[in-house]
Image: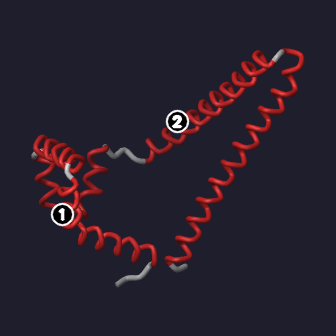
Amino acid sequence: MSVKSKVAAAVSLHMMAWLAMLIALAGIVFLALGVFWLIAPPLGPGIAALIVGGGLLGLILVMTLFGLLIAKTRGKAKRVVAHRSPDNRIEEQLRPVIGDRATEWAKANTGITVVGALSAGVLLAASPSMRRLIYDAARPLIARKALQVMQGLGGSDH
């Protein structure tokens, strides 16, 4: 499967998911409107609006609790499988990007690393010229990583 077809499949799946959510939202809105029109004549518009709004909030609450229960059961299954600490996962992700030596230095000097990262964030947020300078310096790395990702998706071994 080529990279182009993989990207097209991912985009079409993403669009289908959003379309399904839009259709579900439209269905919920029309269902709420139908219930409102059904109960508004005998109860009055104010009470009907409170009942329909409360019902929708109740529906959201039930769906949220259901989602949390699913996430909790999946989280227990994942915790049983992997017992890695967040530091180990971060280190595994950083090591290929910045190298062994820089990773070991960052582990040994975490305070300086945190202060440097926060300072860099403030500088990047405050100064457009600094953003441009950092972007220009990081452009080769970004291009190289993007090329590696594309080659990985394409399955080529160049």
Tag shown at residue 132: none
Instruction: Kindly indicate the quadrant of the structure image that contains residue 115.
Output: top left
Q: Which residue type does callout 2 highlight? A: Lys
Q: For the point 70% across and 28% down, which residue is it?
A: 56
Q: Is residue 133 above or below residue 22?
A: below
Q: For the point 44% across and 47% down, which residue is it?
A: 81
Q: For the point 75% across and 20% down, which residue is it?
A: 51
Task: Give the structural element (helix, strand or loop) at label 2.
Answer: helix
Give the x, y percent position of residue 1: 55, 79
Tag shown at residue 99: 1
Q: Residues within 10 Å of mark 1 (few under 14, many from 20)?
A: few
Q: How is the image coloured?
A: secondary structure
Q: Which residue type does callout 1 highlight? A: Gly
Give the x, y percent position of residue 98: 20, 62
Q: For the point 72% across and 49% down, which residue is it?
A: 23
CA separation in Å, label 2 and label 1: 35 Å
Mark closer to the chain start, 2 or 1: 2
Q: Is residue 63 above or below residue 113?
A: above
Q: In the image, is 149 to the left or to the right of 10? A: left
Give the x, y percent position of residue 133: 18, 62
| Residue indicated by mark 2 | 72
Q: In the image, is 48 to the left or to the right of 105? A: right
In the picture, which quadrant includes the C terminus?
A: bottom left
